[in-house]
Every structure is written in C-alpha cells, then in structure tokens.
C-alpha cells in the first residue's frame, strides 16, 4: 500500500512540474512588440533632434519672392502706339529690381522690404536711375515725359499699366497704380499712354523672356518650423 501511495505522489509531482515549465515559457510575441516600439521611439527622437539641429524652411507662394530668389519680368513703354527704347542695363545693383538691357527686368530681393507683398512695380523707379512714373504717364531716362494729358495725335489718351500673366496670355489686367502690381515670374508689363479705348499689344521684346530664362530658388527664412527648402530653375533658347 505504501508503495502505491508513493507512486501516486511521484506522479502528482511530475505533473505539477510539467505545468510549471509551461507557465515559465517566454512570451516571444510580447517582447517582439516591445522591441519594435522601442526602436521606433528611438528613431523618432533621433529624427526630431536632426530637424532641430538643421532647421530649414521653404517660402510659401505668399512669401515669394524672397532673398535668394531671382525672377524675370518683361517690360515695355508705349507712347501713343509706339514702343520706346528698352531700359539700359542697370549698373547699380543695390536695388532688388534691375534691368538686363533687353526689355527684361530681374527681380531679386536684397532686403525684407523687397520681399513678398512688398515686391510691387513701385520698386521699379527706385532701381532705375532717371526713370519717373506718375499717374498720367512716364519719363524714361534721358527722354521727354510722355503724358496722357497731352493726348495722342489730338485724340484723348489714357495712361494704364497693362499686365499679362505670361507670354501666352492674350488679355491683360489694367492697373492705375504701381503699388497695385504684384511682381510675378514670367510676367509681361506695359506702361502705356494710348488713345482711350485701345489696349496695347505685348512689347516686342517680351520674347526675350524665353532667351534669358527664369529661375526660382528659395533661401532660409526666419521660421524655425519644419519644412524643406526647394529650388527649381528652367531655361530655354528662343
């Protein structure tokens, strides 16, 4: 009887031991998931630190143009249906708007006061010595004043600023004030004293936009928010 009782006890002990071994098995799924979470967390922290140490930002469309950006805009001056000689090449580069000497302007802001919404046609006389523009007409460097008050061949005339969005645009938007004209890349502009009721064509030198090409590049801004600086350029031959 004793031997039978002992055998039962041994059997119960063995069964208990097998259960303990099962309970002590390592939960591989749990530890694998924990490892993935830790690795992902470390990666996110590392990336965040890199972004903080290397802050860059890209200007939005509303911010453009910014310092480091170069745009090109065609411009012409129409006096009663006759386009005047193009502006001479600018030698003073202190201003952010200069003449290339072929009927094309380069817009490259040099200060915050010339960036974004401040980049209007009102900057033009500041960058071209001898150029004056009033509400009635214009005076080119070394030339006589062309004014709507004098009329065109005895007919009433009007002064307007005609802006085409590109070489392919067929209908211009008409402005009366330089400050109303926000400068854009690949724009075409005519300042014209023309007979009332008429619209001047694009200046013939506007085609030079395709020759000089146009470029858009962005530079660092004061923002410390996360973004990526971009640049793009294009050029083509006539």
Image (spheres, grey):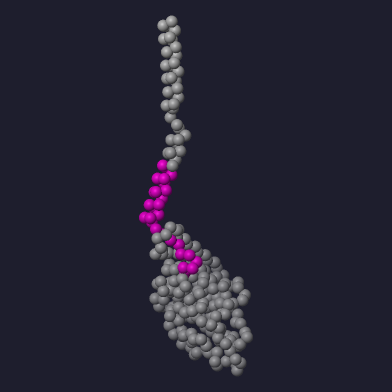
Residue 50 lies within the magenta run = yes
Range covered by the magenta-colored residues: 38-65
Single out the residue that lies furthest toward the front: 1
Q: Is residue 181 visible?
A: yes
The answer to whether residue 100 shows anywhere in this view is no
Judge whether 90 appears above or below 153 on screen: above
Coordinates of residue 46 in the picture (x, y in percent): 39, 49
- Choose between 105 and 54: the one closer to the eye: 54
Find residue 155 and report its image quarter: bottom right
Magenta-drawn stretch contains 61: yes
Tell me: residue 67, above or below residue 77: above
Give x and y (percent) for residue 133: 48, 85
Q: For the C terminus, which image quadrant?
A: bottom right
* Residue that appears at 42% across and 68% down: 67
Residue sitting at x 49%, y 70%: 71
**Picture layout, residue 77 above or below residue 108:** below
x and y percentages locating residue 106 in the rendered image? 47, 73
Of 122 and 24, nearer the camera is 24
Q: Residue at x 50, y 64 (%)?
A: 233
Image quadrant of residue 13? top left
Q: Position of residue 38 (x, y in %)?
A: 41, 42
Up-down: is 8 above or below 209? Answer: above
Outermost residue on the top side: it is 1
Residue at the limit of the structure toward the left, as seen here: 53
x 47%, y 34%: residue: 29
> In this view, which residue lies farthest toward the bottom?
154
Number of numbered labels in the structure image: 0
- In the rendered image, the quadrant that contains the N terminus is top left
């Amino acid at each position: 009887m004793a031997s039978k009782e002992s055998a039962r006890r041994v059997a119960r002990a063995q069964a208990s031991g097998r259960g303990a071994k099962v309970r002590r098995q390592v939960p591989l799924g749990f530890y694998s998931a924990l490892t993935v979470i830790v690795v992902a967390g470390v990666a996110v922290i590392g990336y965040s630190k890199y972004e903080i140490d290397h802050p860059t930002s890209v200007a939005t469309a509303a911010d453009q143009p910014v310092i480091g950006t170069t745009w090109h805009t065609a411009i012409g001056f129409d006096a009663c249906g006759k386009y005047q000689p193009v502006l001479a090449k600018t030698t003073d580069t202190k201003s952010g708007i200069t003449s290339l000497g072929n009927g094309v302007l380069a817009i490259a802001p040099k200060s915050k006061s010339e960036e974004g919404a401040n980049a209007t046609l009102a900057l033009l006389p500041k960058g071209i010595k001898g150029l004056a523009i009033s509400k009635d007409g214009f005076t080119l460097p070394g030339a006589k004043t062309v004014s709507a008050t004098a009329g065109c061949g005895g007919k009433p005339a009007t002064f307007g600023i005609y802006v085409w969005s590109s070489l392919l645009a067929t209908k211009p938007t008409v402005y009366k004030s330089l400050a109303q004209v926000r400068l854009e890349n690949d724009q075409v502009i005519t300042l014209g004293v023309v007979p009332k009721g008429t619209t001047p064509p694009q200046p013939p030198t506007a085609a030079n936009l395709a020759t000089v090409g146009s470029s858009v590049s962005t530079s660092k801004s004061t923002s410390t928010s996360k973004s990526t600086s971009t640049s793009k350029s294009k050029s083509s031959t006539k």
